Amino acid sequence: MAQITLSLLLTFLMRFFEPCSSMPAWHAWLLAIATIVIPLFASLIIHRYFYQSDMYALQISAAYAGLVYRKIAPLLTIFITIIFWHFVKYIAFIAMGFSVSFLLIQSLYSRIFIRLRTKILRITDERIKIISEIIKSMRIVKMYCWETAFSKRIYLIRKHEILQYTLYALYECIQMVFSNNFIPISLLLMFGTMWLYNIRFDTNFFAIAACILSFMRLYVIEYFSLGTQFISNYLAARKRIESFLLLDECDRDNRLLSSSLSQDLEMLSSNEMKMVNDNIEKNIQNGLFALKNIIFDAHPSDLICIIGPVGSGKSSLLQTLTGEIAYFDGKIRLHGSYCYVPQEAWIFSSTVKNNVLFGKEYNQNLFQSVVNVTALDTDFEQLSNGANTLVGDHGVMLSGGQKARVNMARALYRNADIYLLDDPLSAVDVKVSKHLFEKAIKSYLHDKICILVTHQIQFLQDATKIIVLNNGEMVQMGTYNELITSSTLFAHLLEDIHQQKHEFSSDIEQQQSIISTVCLEEDNEEDLMTNTDTKQEGSIRWNVYRSYIRAGVGCIFGFFFILLILIANQAIFLCSSWWLAVWTDAETHRYKTFDNCTSISAKKVNNIHSMTENEWNIYRNRKFYIYCGSILLLLLLTFLRAFTSKLMCLNAGRVLHNKMFQRVIRCPISFFDMNPVGRIINRFTRDIAVIDNNLLFSFPNVLEVS
């Protein structure tokens, strides 16, 4: 409403500046003050309007918003059309038709944007996947001196990604040419039609048309164009999210005991599990591997040991219990919480304490108990920072036995009902393994269900039940005494395991409780403790802008070339508006009679009036041709301004990405030990996305405003 009211006031104010105007000066002053106050008032209200709109958008559903829009949008369109018709008559349909055509074309553009955005995301995923694999395998890369080969591979993928971004920017610039120049193009169509059919117009026509078209450009064209781009990005992301969400869910809910499933099974007491007639299939290289005929149940305080030769399916059985491997026949029921300790310890880059807590609330008594039963207390005594010592990414500062014990301590701290232990004693020496079995498994977990996969035959006598697996099938089950007296297969299996341990014992080194296998100086240890991710705050230094511009255009002259195009674009826009205003003034002087004119105004009016019809047509044609040429030049400069600025941003993103990857891949191994993989990958994902998307969108607008 403020925009429309302002356009009406400008129409009345223009009469004061007409030659021989009889409007009092104080009327003009009131109108001028009103034209200043109304935009100021509108600027104060518009921000409050956006804030309230955002708040309401979070509170109401999209359905209500759609219903309200369908109510209001036609009314607003009809109202603008009526105002347009009142002042410019049927010429208004030219502007409305161009607006509708532009909006229809936007729907086609949205499909192009979705297709291009999907291709860009696919290439980005490939680049991030390869970078992640390179960083995780950096020791192998440096050992074989593959830095140059992998750098070329990443540069090539990044080049393909930038090419897709360039194509996306090209279509975006074409869209910007018509959206940013909506007013000049609409005025060209309107005035061109009136020029072609010799329809008269005046200054009031030009003023009201410019004001209403500016309103339509902001609230119809500009917002719709931005909405089209944002929706295209959303739809491309939605496909990826949907494909992830539609993946098969884990069958954990089906394995948990519930009242609806209790009719199929006998009622189990608290913290029990049962596995009946299970048939699991898993693809391997040489065919199909299956777990079959496995039937057992467990109760609190049970220690079930699972043994068998290598490849018999011991780890697969535990993964089936956790739901990582799907089963196709039989039933698995778990009553209570469970905790799985994998064979390969997983350690993240943080302190030992955080690896044990794993997000749970710190309990000093519980933490100390867990540390004691896992023999980590002696490690803490040898460290200046104790439990707060950083272990590096993947626990590179820890030995294999220490990783296994930290992994075990994390499981014990969870205080679950069922523990699935996948051979946690194989990574430690005999003394530590005996300590873990006696203190952690037998004593600390004495009231829990514990299923232990092990090759340590000296601990089988303490098991309440032993399951023997062979080629994925449960061949025997019983206590140690029952199997040793009645089964020759069990005796032969113990012999084979003992022989394998004897052959492997020569490769096992005595694992002392020290936090690192690498000698570190004290200052390096302090650097490791303070190596945290930080974010700079405050104003951005000018050298950052200079580095970005240099990376984008190669030299400072390229930036000045872009500024020159920008200045020329603004100059052509102002000149075309001025030329159209001169033309409308001449049309007003030609067909309107003025009284009380000054000598200067009268001379100007008389010159227009004294023209013959042929001279007036030549004068009018020259005005239109020059105006038409200025609009075409304006469109060309707008495209060059937008496309060159986007090319500069894309080139800056390519150069900065390649420099960053080159420096990262040339860093020493200590850099990757002290910085988590996620922190490094985030520089190539989130930060590069800001350069490729946010800066690509904002930088041309910054240049235009500046």
Image (cartoon, helix red, strand yellow):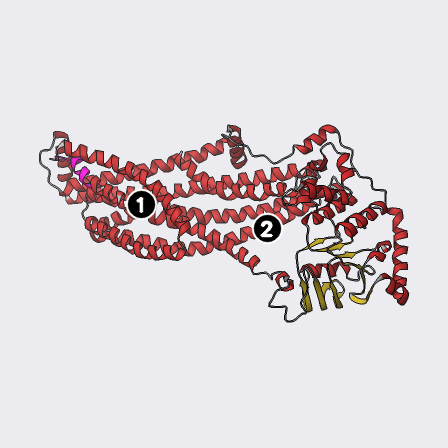
Q: CA distance from mark 1 to mark 2?
A: 41 Å
The three-letter amino acid code for the residue at tag 2 is Asp
Q: Residues within 10 Å of mark 2 (few under 14, many from 20)?
A: few
In the image shown, does 603 or 467 lie closer to the viewer?
A: 467
- Percent across and percent down for residue 140 are 74, 44
Q: Residue at x 29, y 40 (%)?
A: 42
- Percent across and percent down for residue 39 are 28, 38
Q: Can the viewer see residue 308 in this picture?
A: yes
Outermost residue to the bottom: 264
Q: Residue at x 29, y 56 (%)?
A: 74
- Is 184 placed above or below 538 here? below
Segment colored magenta? 11-20
The C terminus appears in which quarter of the rendering?
A: top left
In the image shown, does 45 or 405 lie closer to the viewer?
A: 405
Q: Secondary structure at mark 1?
A: helix
- Percent across and percent down for residue 278 are 72, 68
Q: Residues within 10 Å of mark 1 (few under 14, many from 20)?
A: many
- Percent across and percent down for residue 523 are 71, 28
Q: How many marks?
A: 2
The N terminus appears in which quarter of the rendering?
A: top left
Q: Is residue 640 left or right of residue 479?
A: left
Q: Is residue 340 left or right of residue 68?
A: right
Q: Can you identify the residue that label 2 sits on?
A: 125
Q: Nearer the viewer, mark 1 or mark 2?
A: 2
Q: Can you identify the residue that label 1 sits on?
A: 183
Q: Secondary structure at mark 2?
A: helix
- Res 375 → quadrant: top right
Outermost residue to the left: 595
- Is 63 placed above or below 380 here? below
- Res 248 → quadrant: bottom right
Is residue 404 rendered magenta in the image? no
The three-letter amino acid code for the residue at tag 1 is Ile
